[in-house]
Image (cartoon, rainbow, N blue to C red):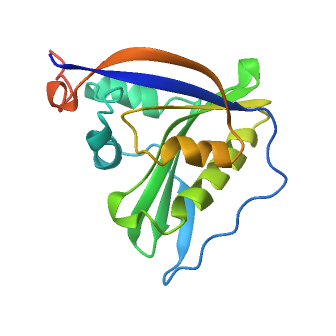
C-alpha cells in the first residue's frame, strides 16, 4: 500500500463571529440544508467528489460502520445547493460532553469553486457548529487538501494550535469500502 506523507494542521475557534456572511450573488437560489439520515450512497458520492483528489479515506468504510458514523446523534450533515445542483457540503460532530464541535469534512464541489461559495458555506458551518452550545470549534486540514483550505480557515478566524506529520494511504489503496462478511 502506497503511503503519502502530509502535515496536518489543527485549528480552533473559541468564539463565534458576530455576524454570518451573506450569500454571494448567484443566478439561482442558494441554500444550505441539514440532511438527516442521508443515504449512504449519496454520502459516498459527495465524499468521493470532494475527497478523492485529496486522498480522503477515513469514511471509506463498510456500509454498517459508515451508517453508524453518519447517522450518529452527534453527527450533522449539511448540503449546499445552487438551484438544483449540489455545490458543497460539510459535516459536523457535536461533542456536548466537552462543549465542543468539530467540522469533520468541508468542501466545495469542483465545478463550483472560485465563486465565493466557500466563504459563505464556512460562515454557515461556523454558526452551525456553535449553535448547540459549543465553546470551541475545531477543524483540521493537511497538505494534501485543496491549497485554499488553510488560508480560508485562517481568514474566518480559526487559529492553528498544533501540527503533526503523518502518513496516510493513497486513495487508490482504499477506493472502495471493504465489504462486510456475512
- What is the residue that sits farthest to the right in this orientation? 18
* Count of number-bearing discs: 0
In percent of width and height, residue 157 lies at 72, 43
Residue beneath the point at 63% across and 70% down: 23
Q: Is residue 59 left or right of residue 173?
A: right
In percent of width and height, residue 72 lies at 51, 29
* Above or below 180: residue 122: below
The quadrant of the rendering that contains the N terminus is top left
Residue beneath the point at 74% across and 40% down: 130
Q: Is residue 166 left or right of residue 15?
A: left
The image quarter in which residue 9 lies = top right
- What is the residue that sits farthest to the bottom in this orientation? 27
The image quarter in which residue 93 lies = top right
Residue beneath the point at 75% across and 43% down: 131
Report the front residue among 31 and 117.
117
In percent of width and height, residue 104 lies at 51, 33
Report the front residue among 154 and 173.
154
* Above or below 49: residue 28: below
Report the front residue among 32 and 4.
4
Report the front residue among 114 and 25.
114
The quadrant of the rendering that contains the C terminus is top left
Residue beneath the point at 49% across and 16% down: 164
Q: Is residue 74 left or right of residue 69?
A: right
In percent of width and height, residue 27 lies at 49, 84
* Above or below 96: residue 149: below
Q: Is residue 127 left or right of residue 26?
A: right
Amino acid at each position: 500500500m502506497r503511503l503519502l506523507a502530509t502535515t496536518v494542521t489543527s485549528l480552533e475557534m473559541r468564539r463565534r463571529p458576530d455576524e454570518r456572511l451573506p450569500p454571494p450573488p448567484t443566478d439561482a437560489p442558494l441554500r444550505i440544508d441539514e440532511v438527516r439520515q442521508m443515504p449512504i450512497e449519496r454520502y459516498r458520492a459527495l465524499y468521493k467528489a470532494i475527497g478523492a483528489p485529496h486522498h480522503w479515506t477515513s469514511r471509506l468504510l463498510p456500509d454498517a460502520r459508515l451508517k453508524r458514523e453518519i447517522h450518529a446523534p452527534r453527527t450533522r450533515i449539511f448540503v449546499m445547493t445552487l438551484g438544483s445542483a449540489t455545490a458543497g457540503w460539510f459535516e459536523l460532530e457535536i461533542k456536548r460532553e466537552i462543549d465542543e464541535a468539530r467540522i469533520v469534512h468541508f468542501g466545495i464541489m469542483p465545478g463550483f469553486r472560485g465563486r465565493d461559495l466557500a466563504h459563505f458555506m464556512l460562515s454557515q458551518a461556523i454558526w452551525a457548529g456553535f449553535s448547540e452550545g459549543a465553546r470551541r470549534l475545531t477543524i483540521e486540514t493537511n497538505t494534501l487538501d485543496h491549497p485554499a483550505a488553510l488560508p480560508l480557515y485562517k481568514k474566518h478566524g480559526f487559529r492553528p494550535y498544533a501540527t503533526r506529520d503523518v502518513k496516510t494511504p493513497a486513495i487508490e489503496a482504499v477506493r472502495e469500502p471493504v465489504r462486510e462478511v456475512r
